[in-house]
Image: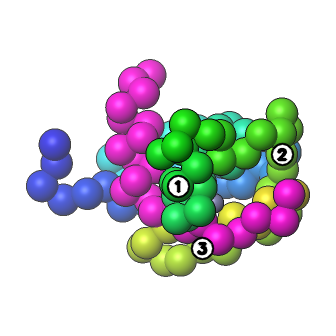
Amino acid sequence: MQATPAQVVDVEVEREVEVRVTYDDGVTATFPVLELRRACPCAGCRGKREHDRPAYEGSSVSILDAELHGNWGISLRWSDGHDTGIYAWQHLRSWWDARGD
Ligand SMILES: [Zn+2]
């Protein structure tokens, strides 16, 4: 646990493949697009997962558009038309750390 959360220094979006986020402590976290879509943090998708339903049932997805929200996070517009989730940098980092590498 760090006293100061790591700041984001670089973001790369490969629309069909993955999103890579580099933090200022040297960690680069990589998130495949399908996993990101399924983990969408918006209320609607959270509700589905809480009822043991997948937030996204397709087997492939891609990113149409990405919007950075400064120090806070990134919002993604998906090929299925969904765009309400904002992925917070620190949430992504926690997710990455929990997975281990
Ligand atoms: Zn969602």
User: In the rendered view of the protein, which quadrant contains the C terminus?
Assistant: top left
At numbered mark 1, what does the secondary structure look like: helix, strand or loop? Answer: helix
Q: Residue furthest top?
A: 101
Q: Nearer the viewer, residue 46 or 96?
A: 46
The amino acid type of the residue labelled 3 equals Leu
Q: Nearer the viewer, residue 83 or 50?
A: 50
Q: Nearer the viewer, residue 24 or 49?
A: 49
Give the mark toward the camera: 1 or 3. 1
Q: For mark 1, does the 10 Å Cα neighbourhood hold few (<14), some (14 to 19), or many (20 or more) residues?
A: some
Q: Residue furthest bottom?
A: 70
> What residue is disc 2 on?
61
Residue 19 versus residue 101 in the image, above or below = below
Q: Residue furthest left?
A: 3
Q: Is residue 26 visible?
A: no
* Lower position in the chain sequence, tag 3 or tag 2: 2
> What residue is disc 1 on?
47
| Residue 68 tag number | 3
Q: For mark 2, does the 10 Å Cα neighbourhood hold few (<14), some (14 to 19), or many (20 or more) residues?
A: some
Instruction: Give the magenta-colored segment's residue range.
Output: 80-101
* Lower position in the chain sequence, tag 1 or tag 2: 1
The amino acid type of the residue labelled 2 equals Val
Identify which residue is drawn at 40% across, 53% down.
Answer: 91
